Image (tube, rainbow, N blue to C red):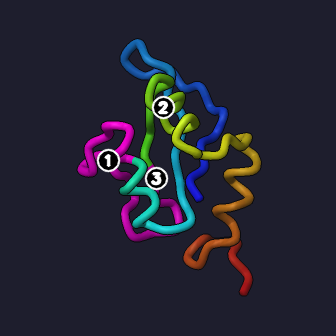
Amino acid sequence: MVYIDNFNACYRGMKMCHMIADSTEELLTMADQIGVNRKWIQDAGTYNEHFDICQAKKAKALRLGAQEVTLLQLGRMLIKRPGHPLYQP
């Protein structure tokens, strides 16, 4: 599953949010589908692997089945991933 938070950070005149997924494959597939270049992935291979995407890309991802979550919910998801400082197996 791909998740997109409700964050609205301003960056170069755009509103940006975060896109994560349960797996790298799902994340990269969605990036391809919404037209986000794979080279823009951040923290690849870590618990915090994600893309920052603009609102237009967010809307497209949601139409393709991504699930919108709050920023708090996204943070709680990251804590459950190995490598996160607060992770507890």
For residue 36, which quarter of the picture?
top left
Q: Quadrant of the C terminus?
A: bottom right
Going from N to C along the chain, the mark reached first, 3 or 2, is 3
For residue 57, which quarter of the picture?
top left
Q: Name the residue under label 2.
A: 60
Residue range of the region highlighted in magenta in the rendering: 31-50
Q: In this view, does 87 lie above or below 12?
A: below
Going from N to C along the chain, the mark reached first, 2 or 1, is 1
Q: What element carries label 2?
A: helix
Q: Mark 3 points at which residue?
A: 50
Horizontal placement of 73 versus 55: left or right? right
Q: Does the magenta stretch include residue 11?
A: no
Going from N to C along the chain, the mark reached first, 3 or 1, is 1
Q: Distance between the residues labelled 2 and 1?
A: 11 Å
For residue 37, which quarter of the picture?
top left
Q: How far apart are marks 3 and 1 (CA)?
A: 14 Å
Disc 2 marks which amino acid? Lys
Q: Is mark 3 on a helix, strand or loop?
A: loop
Q: Mark 1 points at which residue?
A: 32
Disc 1 marks which amino acid? Asp
Q: Is residue 46 magenta?
A: yes
Asked if marks 3 and 2 touch (Cβ < 8 Å), the reply is no
Q: Residues within 10 Å of mark 1 (few under 14, many from 20)?
A: few
Q: Which of marks 3 and 1 is in front?
A: 1
Q: What's the mark number on residue 72?
A: none
Q: Distance between the residues labelled 3 and 2?
A: 17 Å
Q: In this view, does 9 lie above or below 45?
A: above
| Residue at 55%, 35% in the rendered image | 63
